[in-house]
Image (tube, rainbow, N blue to C red):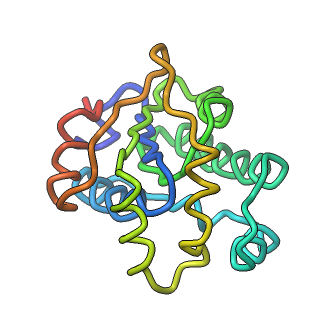
Amino acid sequence: MHAASRHRPTLLVMAGVSGSGKSSVGRRVADRLGWPFLDGDSLHSPANIAKMRADQPLDDADRLPWLDAISRWMDARQAEGTSAVIACSALKQRYRDRLRHGHPDVQFIWLKVDRAELARRLDQRTGHFMPAALLASQLAAWEPPAPDEPVMTIPANGDLEATVRAVLAVARTV
């Protein structure tokens, strides 16, 4: 269903650690819904990218301006009345709270993948600035959603298409 038929836009945030499929799933979900897609990685500063390429994990000071850039992109979609899909790790509850602020129709989808599968995917990935060596730091930073957080959990160990179907089944699109 397109945003024009909605009263307020939905903002779907594909969340999870590196290798969970946020970008791959998010792009396919956005394509199926006819919504714009933002890969949050595209808004990282050159300094953040250089740090990650050097196998140095980001900290809160690095991530907060990045989260604010994503939030501004979400603000613009909301102002247009356009629903959208965003890939963003949203590793910590306070990060999810920051993205949720001012966005009443944001819905987080946690793509839950076990460590062995994450490692396998990262070892096979090419052309991305996030090295497999930083998986441990991402897992250490990850805060599973609190019971009162509006986060839907989707097991994402398996087939990409099955994960996309599962996300579409739970996403608020009407």
The C terminus is located in which quarter? top left
Task: Please say if 99 is above or below 17.
Answer: above
Q: Quadrant of residue 31?
A: bottom left
Task: Please say if 53 is above or below 73.
Answer: below
Q: Quadrant of residue 37?
A: bottom left
Q: Which of 162 and 146 is in front in this view?
A: 146
Disc tally is: 0
Classify residue 144 as left or right of residue 163: right
Q: Nearer the viewer, residue 150 or 5?
A: 150
| Percent coordinates x, y for residue 72 in the rendering | 68, 46
| Percent coordinates x, y for residue 49 in the rendering | 72, 73
Q: Residue at x 23, y 33 (%)?
A: 170
Classify residue 19 as left or right of residue 76: left
Q: Nearer the viewer, residue 5 or 47?
A: 47
| Percent coordinates x, y for residue 81 in the rendering | 47, 38
Q: Residue at x 49, y 28 (%)?
A: 145
Q: Residue furthest top?
A: 148
Classify residue 158 as left or right of residue 50: left
| Percent coordinates x, y for residue 142 in the rendering | 57, 42
Q: Residue at x 44, y 22 (%)?
A: 150
The N terminus is located in which quarter? top left
Q: In which quarter of the image is residue 153?
A: top left
